[in-house]
Image (cartoon, rainbow, N blue to C red):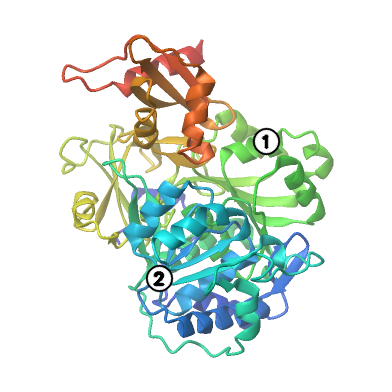
Amino acid sequence: METRIWHKFYDYNVPLEVRFPRMPVPQFLHVSAAQFPHKACTSFYGSDLTFRQVRSQVLRMANALLKMGVKKGDRVGLALPNCPQYVIAYYAALSVGAIVVNMNPIYTANELKFMMENSGLETLFTFDMVLGTMRPLAKELQLKNVIVTKVTDYINGFGVSDAKSLELEEGWHHFSELIEKTTDEKLPRVSISADDPALIQYTGGTTGLPKGAVLTHYNLVAGAMIGDFWGSPIGVFNDRAKRKILGAIPYFHIYANTYAMNIAVYSGATQVLVPRFDLEEFMGLLGSVDEIFYFPTVPTMITAIINHPKAEELKIGERIKLLSSGGAPMPVELIQKVKDVGIFFTEGWGMSETSSVGISNPVLVNKVGAIGVPVIGTDVRLVDIEEGKTDVKQGEPGEIIIKGPTVMKEYWNNPEETANQLRDGWLYTGDIGQMDEDGYIYIVDRKKDMIIAGGFNIYPREVDEVLYQHPKVAEGVTVGIPDPYRGETVKAYIVLKPGQTATEQEIIDFCKTKLAAYKVPKIVEFRDSLPKSAVGKILRKILRDEEIAKAKK
């Protein structure tokens, strides 16, 4: 790739180009297990597993999967929180050439069913607390292999559950029992190429249905390595033998998958695993860890931590060396607070379709308000919004299109959407940005109306469709409105059918039965009518602009 204007702003020891190894993702684990055999790979509520122990369990689980008949190219679902079992299942599935399907375990049955059916997965890893949802789904979809764990099985002193205590169905497997009885630790004799699919990451679609972004081993290897190189201005001072990374955002989300788990395994860092973000519990955890080299996070978490009464007492500026923020823009005031405390940070932009990697602020030369510059080996153009063919003039808004080593292969079983968004190797992102004279990019608006609340992506159309299912609702539309804590929050505007009355709580409770908690509207406003275009389309933008104007008053 030729030199670009933004290259001169890269931090001093970040390379412009890297020849990424054409290897499968599990090679990260084998390298780190050879270099740091006795170092903790995972740390979970004070219980540690070394790199060598994790490698051993990954190989046992991989050989168990082969015995079950899991073949190269088969899809394996992971519906687990952040825990050692997630890491083991992920690397085991990839070791046999299977494709991991990431799923949020707190999704509703409908949401999970779509992903399971669409991906055609036949093997599922899940855990005790969501069996109420998973049992009927596994039966209905006739899944061949279901492997269940209890999250506390990997915490010393809690004892280990078994198939009987979890009342598992006939033919289902218990995670720990499977590893215990599989003694084979040979490397699976499966040929895996860098271009083979490794992960299906579901993301919102223009049709309202999620699309499965297919990421290859090469995409994921490049993503983790780029992230590690990007942090090198701080990393150069940090001893890899002691390095710790905080895994607090969910691993089923591509951001944490790349920037927490895969970076940690690649760089030989201990992953301090947090299965759920409870603020008081989290502050206690921070107090028990001497130092964290890197903490990938979202603005909601940063706000909560930096403003916590214990923040000063814990001297968090001495404990956390580097944090990265994604998922939503960081308010200027928050950036200043982080800098005042003495924590280095980088803020960036990525998508499921780019392995969460794409544009990022250099650690030492970041511009407040910008999402940064294109990362190593990545090219970005801003093109006209209508046709998407002509580059706009510098400073003018245009659709961000991106090309690079982390850009997905395709959408799973969706050639139409693939052709729509991937053209001549360029991914059309649907985000509108502006580029300044230095190559720094600023997000202006979203072509799509996605809401980002607390780092989670919410697709309004999905929520709208649930609103319309309510028997009293004539019209409903969902909008992301500014929220100082979550970045944005979900607000629903509703027109009731003639003669009907309803309360805000009634609508919220209805949505709770059909949507994951973070997608449920937090505010409901009833109106006599909604703003519409000449062709009768509800104008979401007008409603959002009203809320932004209100927030500024």
State which tag comes first along the sequence, 1 or 2.
Answer: 2
Dot 2, how many residues are within 10 Å of its Cα: few (below 14), some (14-19), or many (20+)? many
Dot 1, how many residues are within 10 Å of its Cα: few (below 14), some (14-19), or many (20+)? some
Identify whether 219 is placed above or below 72. Answer: above
Q: Are marks 1 and 2 in contact (CB under 8 Å)?
A: no
| Mark 2 secondary-structure assignment | helix
Q: Residue furthest right?
A: 313
In x, y percent, where is residue 350?
A: 42, 49
Residue drawn 20% across the image and 49% down it: 420
| Mark 1 secondary-structure assignment | helix
Residue drawn 56% across the image and 59% down it: 80
Task: Report the front residue among 35 and 197.
Answer: 197
What's the amino acid at mark 2?
A: His
Report the disc number at residue 304: 1
Residue identifier under label 2 = 217
Task: Report the front residue among 405 and 419.
Answer: 419
Task: Report the front residue among 41 and 523.
Answer: 523
In x, y percent, where is residue 496?
A: 37, 15
Report the disc number at residue 342: none
Q: In this view, does 485 lie to the left or right of 545?
A: right
* Quadrant (top left, top right, bottom left, bottom right) of the N terminus: bottom left
